[in-house]
Image (spheres, rainbow, N blue to C red):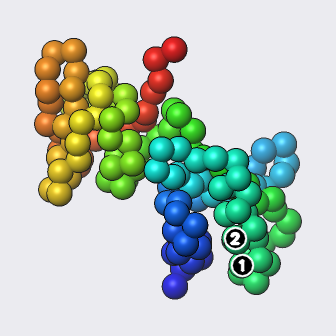
Amino acid sequence: MSLESDIKNLVESIGLHLYDTSIVTENSETIYRVNVIGEGGTTMDQCVEATKLISPMLDVTPPVQGEYRLEVSSPGVERKLKTLEHFRYSVGEKVKLTLQDKTKLRGELKSVGEDGTLTIETEAGTEAIPFDSVVKAATYFEW
């Protein structure tokens, strides 16, 4: 099993879903970032609980060589959508898409079909978009 699948199993054991993992460098510090998402949101207590589960595993199987800091958090209200699973977690939220033909769409994500079709309610009406035609996507929040 891979490190990511092990982390996925751990966070699922406490009712969360693994959104993604990344390694970033900020201010000369390496951070192993684990983003988790729960039904109806993610609480600070859930992030702390996930950290306590993940940290001992990373002591045995570090994600990078050298020193790093583990950071477990929600992916946020405005987040990138890269996988079909990301879109499934975002049904009911506002999304903005850029398609292969450079078309840009904004609207509410209504559904994600089994075949990967994204249904989006835009100002112009309902659009059915094949997942494969999306080159860039993110959720957004209207302030």
Q: So how many labels did they put on this image?
A: 2
Task: Give the image location of residue 7, x and y in percent.
Answer: 59, 71
Disc 1, SS:
helix
Badge 2 local density, few (<14 within 10 Å), some, or many (20+)?
Answer: some
Is residue 37 in sight in this rendering?
Answer: yes
Q: Between residues 60 and 42, which one lies in front from this camera angle?
A: 42
Residue 112 rendering spot, x and y as whole percentages: 23, 47
Instruction: Report the disc number at residue 54.
Output: 2
Could you say which quadrant of the image residue 130 lies in? top left
Q: Position of residue 142 (x, y in %)?
A: 46, 17
**Residue 70 location, x and y as percent?**
76, 60
User: Could you say which disc has been placed on residue 57 in the image?
Assistant: 1
What residue is at 73 percent from the left and 75 percent from the top? 58
Q: Secondary structure at mark 2?
A: helix
* Type of amino acid at the residue the image marks with label 1: Met
Residue 120: image quadrant is: top left
